[in-house]
Amino acid sequence: MAYRGVVGASGVAVPSVATALRQVKLDKESELRVEVGPDTPLRLRLLTGSAEIFGTEIAPEIWLNFPPRLNFAVFTWYGATIEIDGSTETDYTADETPMISYVNVHAVLEGRRNRAKASSSDSDSSQGPRVIVVGPTDSGKSTLSRMLLSWSAKQGWKPTFVDLDIGQGSITIPGCIAATPVEMPIDPVEGIPLEMPLVYFYGHTTPSVNADLYKVLVKELAHTLEGQFAGNAESRAAGMVINTMGWIEGVGYKLLLHAIDTFNANVVLVLGQEKLYSMIKNVLKKKPNVDVVKLQKSGGVVSRNTRVRQKARSYRIRKYFYGLSNDPSPHSNIANFSDLVVYRVGGGPQAPRSALPIGAKPAADPTRLVSVNINRGLLHSVLAVSFAKEPDQIISSNVAGFIYITDIDIQRFEISNFRLIAVYQKHKGQLPGKFLIVGTLTWIET
């Protein structure tokens, strides 16, 4: 079986197809909204003034290279001149943005961090803001999260970013919940750094496949972070920013409330929907220490259909394995079937009918481990490499990284080709564990 893997690691729109160099002058408190074309990258640089992307300042005269299909906005507080080289799907300027309200939220959070830092380390007031961003699909949750994190890091804090959006995956790949400290403003092109991620593999791109498992993993992540905060006053004061999925009705709404409770969030930012704001406000009215704030979504948010979302997921997986420019390329290796054990989480009855009360039906166990035979049915699957030493530790263990199955040789009983980057280079091409987790996450490499 061959596989590859990485371990450890708003104005009037004017469609643009021009490829010549062109300049855009931005007035103060306005932004340039850009949708990069589907086939070719785009270059952009700051000529005069000051500007930022997702809360991160742009260095002057330095070209930034944006890959195809990326959407972003260049905002300036005092005015700027931007130069663009390449074609775009759409680019336009807008002077009506919610940035003032966003930066006001940042200012309030900054005050809470300073008060937490000044408090006794063993008091409740030493806990900095725990901000959870909620809202419907395509309301700008990820963008706002990045802004709040980058503004905080610019002030010298190291807030923790928690990503619960398994549909897209801002830290590693889709199908995961993850957390990582943010020590510097987030690079507008590279995104979240992969040096120190804490990742739990759910294995699906929607919680509806196994909502109970999703809740279990959210609890595991929250429990681990609590332990880290208990021993690090600086991280505790810096707090966290939690990004969530866009499923806000039915089971999705219940999972949002579960996340708010599990992470002990004390600030809930609701983007783009009055109904959701009212519902959460009503539920949390008995918790005076939790602030629920309604914010306007940006007019630059682009609605995406199912096909576009699938392409975005594919791009995230490819970026994880290859990087933005196909470098580093993944390492290759060969392993025998006997060296690896593949499990699927969830499935199978909890007990036989004979052991159940009369009339009761057997129910699927959402956390039951099911052994999976290595065969060609795993082709194109993305599997997680668990840190677990024993099978019963798989649910509670985070993962070291991921492998992508490219080929399976049944006759030779072999797998090959996996990839290692960043901190896990020390494994020298070897997987750090023998337990692999498979879900429904697949990828067709093109």
Image: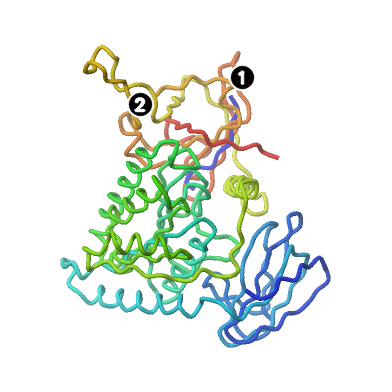
Whether residue 322 can be seen here? no
Given residues 380 and 120, the one toward you in this image is 380
Identify the element where label 1 is drawn.
loop
Mark 1 crowdedness (10 Å alpha carbons): few <14, some 14-19, many ≥20: some
Q: Residue at x 30, y 69 (%)?
A: 291
Quadrant containing the C terminus is: top right
**Identity of the residue drawn at 67% across and 78% down:** 46
Quadrant of residue 23 within the rendered picture? bottom right
Q: Which mark is residue 144?
A: none
Q: Which residue is mark 1?
A: 409
Please tell me which residue lies in front, 136 or 222.
Answer: 136
Q: In this figure, what is the number of numbered marks?
A: 2
Q: At which x and y percent is residue 271?
A: 46, 65
> In this figure, which residue is indicated by the disc labeled 2?
364
- Location of residue 1 by image quarter: top right
Q: CA distance from mark 1 to mark 2?
A: 32 Å
Of helix, strand and loop, which one carries label 2?
loop
The quarter holding residue 363 reads top left
What x and y, as percent, mark residue 400? 44, 42
For mark 2, does the 10 Å Cα neighbourhood hold few (<14), some (14 to 19), or many (20 or more) residues? few
> Looking at the image, which is closer to me, 235 or 165?
165
Q: How is the image coloured?
A: rainbow
Q: Looking at the image, is mark 1 or mark 2 earlier in the sequence? A: 2
Q: Is residue 250 above or below residue 100?
A: above
Q: Nearer the viewer, mark 1 or mark 2?
A: 2
Q: Position of residue 443 (x, y in %)?
A: 61, 38
- The amino acid pointed to by label 1 is Asp
Residue 348 in percent (x, y) is at 37, 22
User: Which residue type carries mark 2?
Assistant: Ala
Q: Residue at x 41, y 47 (%)?
A: 199
Tell me what residue is drawn at x 77 percent, y 70 percent.
85
